[in-house]
Amino acid sequence: MKPDVAALRSLLRSESAKAGTQAVIFGMWSGQDEVLVEALGYSTPGVPATPAMHYRIGGITETFMTTLLLILAERGRIDLDSKISRWFPDLLAADQVTPRMLAANTAGYLDYVRDKAWLDRLLADPLTPFTDDELIHYSVRDGKMQYSPPGSDWAYSHTEYVILGQVIERATGESMPSLYQRYLLGPSGLRDTKLPANAAIQAPALHAYMLDRGRYEDSIAWTPSWAWSYGGLTSTVRDLGRWGRIFGRGLLLTRASFKELTGPGSAKQKASHKGVYFAHGFVVANGWYVQNPDFNGYAGAFAYNPAHDLTLVIVSTKSEKPVIDPAAIHILTEMIRQVTPETPLNF
């Protein structure tokens, strides 16, 4: 069935207004064909948002990182089942944890984002970078792991992707920007997607806004270092629209690696997931592969459905008085309900 573009455009506008957004950039593709790309609102006062604007994609980067990991494993550059003590000899539980566990978020490390000291530091000084060692220290400083032993169950942890990024760099002797470019961005033709070394975003850039420090402020310069290797990619809606199908059909992977990428990461999830589970850097829900990051004021939503060969990409920024925050996942849910009512997005 051909999507009703007029209805989609109307729904996008109404749901964006209902959420109280500052800006929304949206894209939908059927296969490789563009269905609708539209930008609403303003990047900064007097500067309209446009589809050409670059922004931080946050956790959507995890779909790149885990795809990269499996490519490196296929090429013999990293062993998914090696103990990470090979690269982190002094890290808590490193002799029990593998890259496979880190990618699936089953390693058991506490999430530093839940640490009040980490949050206090970020909000007090949002422009100063963190080092990976500092981030890992917030997680392990008390000598405690999550409630379950490594490999036994799933719990989302930013810490595990920080460690995984370091493992990939140490195993290959190459930087994450270089690896992303060689194995993913170059082969996929993603010219507007980069991993900047600092807070810079290539022009034209969409500005984001935060309210977390008690005032409405532009957060485009806030450090991305607290999620750099797995959240720091910058891109555009059209580049991510292209990536959705490449990632979601496993076009850069062997069939076995793609099955690994999209499957449940723990035995417990395999036994009880009922169609909703965390795979390797993204959620699988009712046939959709989904990521919905909220990163330094950029609320994102990214979804691919292999049965319908549909890709949807959204980024939203908040106004001074947001009604639904983050807005992007709300808008994504309503757009999917419109275009494929038989497979709504249900978490």
Image (cartoon, rainbow, N blue to C red):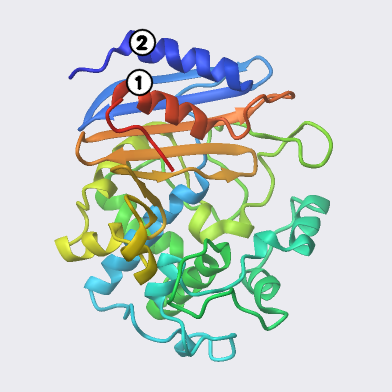
Question: Relative to residue 94, is residue 28 drawn left or right?
Answer: left
Residue 55 percent location from the top left of the image: 53, 38
For residue 122, above or below residue 79: above
Where, by quadrant of the figure, is residue 335 drawn? Answer: top left
Residue tagged by mark 1? 338
Mark 2 burial class by Cα count in 10 Å: few <14, some 14-19, many 20+: few
**What amino acid is at disc 2?**
Ala
Eye-nearest disc, 2 or 1: 1
Question: Relative to residue 39, is residue 42 drawn left or right?
Answer: right
CB atoms at circles 2 and 1 under 8 Å apart?
Answer: yes
Which quarter of the figure is the C terminus placed in? top left
Total numbered circles: 2
Where, by quadrant of the figure, is residue 49 drawn? Answer: top right
Q: Is residue 204 visible?
A: no
Which mark sits nearer the N-terminus, 2 or 1? 2
Residue 57 percent location from the top left of the image: 50, 44
Nearer to us in this view, 245 or 291: 291
